[in-house]
Image (cartoon, grey):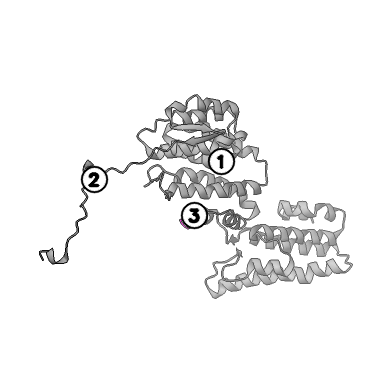
Amino acid sequence: MDISKQLQEELWESIKKSYLSEDYTTAILNAIAYLRDIIREKSNLELDGADLINQAFSGEHPKISVSNMETRNDKNIQKGLRELLSGIYTHIRNPRSHDKYEDSKENAIAIILFVNYLLNIIDKSKTSFSSEKFIQQVYDDFFHPTKEYGELLVNDIPRKQIEDTFYKLYKSIDSYISINELDYYYEGWEVEELSNNDKKIKALKIIFPLLIEKLPNSKNNIFQEFSNDLIDLSSNSTIQLFSKLIIFMEYWSKLSKKTRLRTLQFLIRIDSKNDEILEHYQTKSLVLGWEYFSDEEKQIIQNNLSIINFSIKDNKLIKNVEEKKIIQYYGQPIQTVPNIDIDVDEIPF
């Protein structure tokens, strides 16, 4: 019997060497280890044995669900799978881990096919994590703007979904960051009130480095895609360009030089005289990016400072804030009433 054609490809690869060398007990243990790894990835748990099975498949909202968990039958199906998986450990894996076993080929085929059956069920299961829900949590009005909170959100993402979640969140920027929002910025006041856009950008600036750190593959692909994205952006997408720069400015040097030079033209040439919102993000991009610009790029910016109200002090780019003057109502001076000493008896009412 050619078992390889009846198994998931990755399961077969995990047992192939031991199975073909007729070490059937090891093949069984390798199959169960592969099953464990799949459960870990889907549940985002690093446990093993009964603890892994119970935490992944138990509760009203299990991390891995094979039913809608609404009717008694749904709950029985979930419970049945949990008990089958527990049985795999207690009846099959644990004895072979603790004592010497010499399984026959027939036993190995039966057990490995059963593991394959369980894997097929788990593949169709739903997990408690969804990238859509994660994105909503990032843009939530009550996002707690700290690295600690960001780590708690990112740690809930199963490893196999990190890359997909990263790209979905990146693509969401164009939809969630918009110049059309009611977007005010108060500058020079004792308290700066962040606009909706500012709050979202601040959340993304926390989340994206945490996601990039966890990405399993080469990060060069991300920076290449980011470079291509900025090259393609037009003047109609200026707010999105500024937003992405603010979020990813620490990775500025990883972008292609062609992208950096073109993007600098957006930063120094945009006509923002009649648009305080764009001026705000233009300013923020330049100031936050100053430490990441090369000497050549800083010189390009300095040569164009005449069009914007900036100065350079101690190698830092500083926005010059004009002193706010109180404009009196309708331009009329406020009439003050002189202090007059009046005896109470003299008041005519």
Mark carried by residue 248: 1
Q: Quadrant of residue 278?
A: top left
Q: Which residues are magenta?
A: 138-143
The residue closer to the viewer here, 254 or 68, is: 254
Up/down of 267 relative to 59, above or below? above
- For the residues labelled 2 and 1, the Cα–Cα distance comes to 44 Å
Q: Considering the image in quadrants, where does the N terminus appear?
A: bottom right
Residue at point 85% right, 69% down?
A: 98
Residue identifier under label 3: 136
How far from the left and from the top, in percent, is residue 215? 65, 47
In the foreground, 90 or 58: 58
Q: Residues within 10 Å of mark 2 (few under 14, many from 20)?
A: few
The residue that appears at 59% across and 48% down in the rendered structure is: 164
Q: Position of residue 148 (x, y in %)?
A: 59, 56
Category of crowding for the residue at label 1, using alpha-carbon neighbours closer than 10 angstroms: few (below 14), some (14–19), many (at least 20): some
Q: Secondary structure at mark 2?
A: helix
Mark 2 to mark 3 CA distance (whole Å): 44 Å
Q: What type is the residue that disc 1 sits on?
A: Phe
Q: Secondary structure at mark 1?
A: helix
Does 139 lie within the magenta span?
yes
Name the residue at the bottom extreme: 72
Horizontal and vertical percent position of residue 144: 52, 57
Count the labels in the image.
3
